Amino acid sequence: MKTSRIAAAAAVAGSAVLVLSSPAFAHVSVQPEGAAVKGGYAVVDFKVPNERDDASTTKLEVTFPTEHPLASVMPEPISGWTVKVTKSKLAKPAEMHGETITEAVTKVTWTATGKGVEPGYFQKFPVSVGMLPTDADQLVFKALQTYSDKDVVRWIEVQKDGEEEPENPAPTLTLTSASASGATAEDASDKTETTASDSTSSSADSSDTTARVLGVVGIAVGAAGVAYGVLAGRRRTTV
C-alpha cells in the first residue's frame, strides 16, 4: 500500500515537472545558418515548435526591429505557406552604409494554406537579412504564433540582464563581430596540424609493423637455412 502511494506521488511529481518545463522547449526562436556577422548578410531561421496537442500552428507574424532597420529582407518560399512582407516608413530616417533609409521591412507574415505545423512537429522559416547593424550585439524579433483554434501566443517579452527568462521570450538573434572569423581560421589550422600529426603517427606505426614482419621473415629464412645445412651434413656422413 505504501509502495503504491510512493509510486503515485512520484508519477504526479514527474508530470508536474514535464508540465512546468515543457514551455522552455517550445519557444519560437531565431538562429543564424552559420554566423550573423555585424555589417554583413545572413540567413536566419525562425523555428516554430507546436506546443499544443490539440491544435496546429497556422500563422506566424514576426516584427522586425525599427531601431536597427534592415534594408534587405527576403523570405525563402515554403511549401504549404504563403508569405507577406510588410514595409513601413521609419519614424526617423536611418543612415546605412552611406545611404539614407526612409522605409524598411517591419513585419513578415506566414500563413498556412494547409494543416500548418501539426502537434508533435516544428517548422523553420528561413529569411535572408542584411546588412546587419555594426552598433548592436543582438536583434530582437517579436513574434505572434496563431493556432487553428484561434488562440494566439505572443512571444514579445524581452530578456533583461540579471533576470530570469520571461514566460514568453521574444526571439533574439545574437550578432558576432567580424574578428570572430579569425577563430575559424585558427580552428582550421589546428585541425590541419592534428590531421598531419595523425598521418605521421600512422606512417610511423606502418613502418614499425613492416619492420617486424621483415624481421620475422628473416628469422624464418635463417632457420630454414640452418635446417638445410644440418640435413646436408648428415647426408655426407652417411655416404
Image (spheres, grey):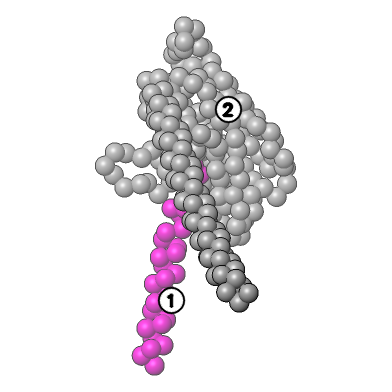
**The magenta segment:** 1-29
Label 1 packing within 10 angstroms: few (<14), some (14-19), many (20+): few
130 lies above or below 99: below
Residue 43 spot, x, y in % from top left: 56, 30
92 lies above or below 73: above
**204 and 54: which one is in front?**
204
Prevailing secondary structure of the magenta residues: helix
Can you see residue 171? no
| Amino acid type, mark 1 | Ala
Residue at x-position 59% and y-position 49%? 122
**66 and 178: which one is in front?**
178
Residue at x-position 41% and y-position 82%? 7
| Amino acid type, mark 2 | Ser
Residue at x-position 49% and y-position 44%? 203
Q: Which part of the image, by quadrant, shows the N terminus?
A: bottom left
Label 2 packing within 10 angstroms: few (<14), some (14-19), many (20+): some
Residue 28 spot, x, y in % from top left: 50, 44
Q: Which residue is mark 1?
A: 11
Q: Which residue is mark 2?
A: 128
139 inside magenta stretch: no
Q: Earlier in the sequence, mark 2 or mark 1?
A: 1
14 inside magenta stretch: yes
**167 and 6: which one is in front?**
6
